[in-house]
Amino acid sequence: MAIQDHNLKLTEQQYRDLELPSYSMLASIDKQGLDVVGGVKSSLNLKFGSLVDMMCFDPHKVEDTFYKGATAKPPTTNVKNICDYILQNLDGKVGQIAEDVTPLGRRKSKKITGKLQDYTKEILDAAVKLKVYKNYSDQKTIDTVVNAGKEYFKDKMTSRGKILIKPDMWLLASNAAATLIQHPFTSKYFAQNVPGVEIIYQYKFDSTVHGMRCKGMLDCLVVNHKAKLIIPVDLKTGESPCKDFPMLYTSHRYYIQGALYREAIYSILSNDFDLTGYAVKPFEFIYISKLNPNRPMRFQVSEDMHNKAMTGFTDRYGYEYRGVIDLLQDYYYSIQNNNTDYRQSEHDSNGLIIMDEELILGK
């Protein structure tokens, strides 16, 4: 089999529905505890990073997933509240037919559109319901809301089922993606016609690490068939400058991702006779800051840091980071014992933690 044959033929949602530990799950366990297993993990605003990822690696999906808004910011509070009130009472599919009632009590069909001026009755009803514009005439209320809210309303209607991106963020993401594809430091990850080199984007796997099953979705897997080398690569974005990425590597638990994914690729190779002789190179992160989308940098995880990420380490400030192996064991202990309150060590000690010098002072 080829390495591509191990790429799961799943949609992104099907992949996310797999009940297996992933990098994000293990990172959440480390940050928040076992109660995230089967629950809700903390999330950040990942719109920018997701958009850049898709523009780079799945550009054909951008239009179906994201919608570029026309307005940089919402209108005034009253206008926004009226628009939101109307939107809540629509099922949101432009072109559908809704039932309305004429002044004589007869039912008639009304086409749902993305044009706010088509909802004069709803605007007036919303103003009464929300108790705003009490001293305005009906026409003044309609004109005020339509003039200030039409672009916001159109954006909300048209983007239903998609992720709405503000124009300024869209421009930043476009610039960042174009830089990554063209920059001499990173363009090689997008060179698809190099003889003997296969580049696979959004590589989804279901593999094992130290005998424990896990999943992952890697932005980029570079396979050099001539040299029999495989390079796992992941793209990261953020507001921090590139010089801060080593700090983000620990604080965002990227070290878990790098180690987990590389070990998972090792497992795939070791269980496929046709891939005998291939070696997995050190994990690489590409980082680009949206505050400087013209300056990408590459960060390669050394062999010694990879090993530390697997077993755990203490940083220069004395903060202890747990390794991939421990976190996977926590996950499976929780699943097998239906216990999302305590780690096995906490359960075994009857909930007792000794507050000694080593714990408090790091001695």
Image (spheres, helix red, strand yellow):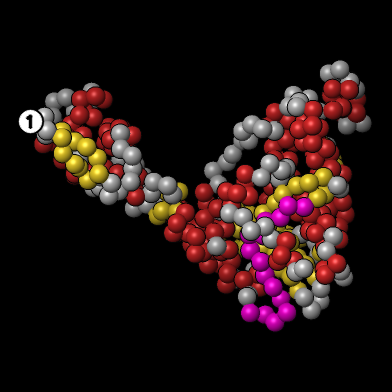
Residue at point 13%, 25% (across, down): 135
Q: Residue at x 53, y 67 (%)?
A: 178
**146 relative to 252 in the view: left or right:** left
The chief SS type of the magenta part is: strand
Quarter occupied by the N terminus: bottom right
Residue 145 in view here: no
User: Residue 155, position in %: x, y?
Assistant: 34, 48
Which residue does the image show at 34% across and 50% down from the upper left? 158
Residue 270: quarter of image:
bottom right
Q: Could you tell me if residue 335 is visible in this image?
A: yes
Quadrant occupied by the C terminus:
top right
Which residue position is annotated with label 1? 104
Say which element carries label 1.
loop
Q: Residue furthest bottom?
A: 195
The verdict on residue 203 being magenta is: yes
Q: Nearer the viewer, residue 182 or 332?
A: 332
For the residue marked with disc 1, what is the amino acid? Leu
Asked if 93 appears above or below 286 in the picture, the reply is above
The magenta region covers 193-207
Residue 276 in magenta? no
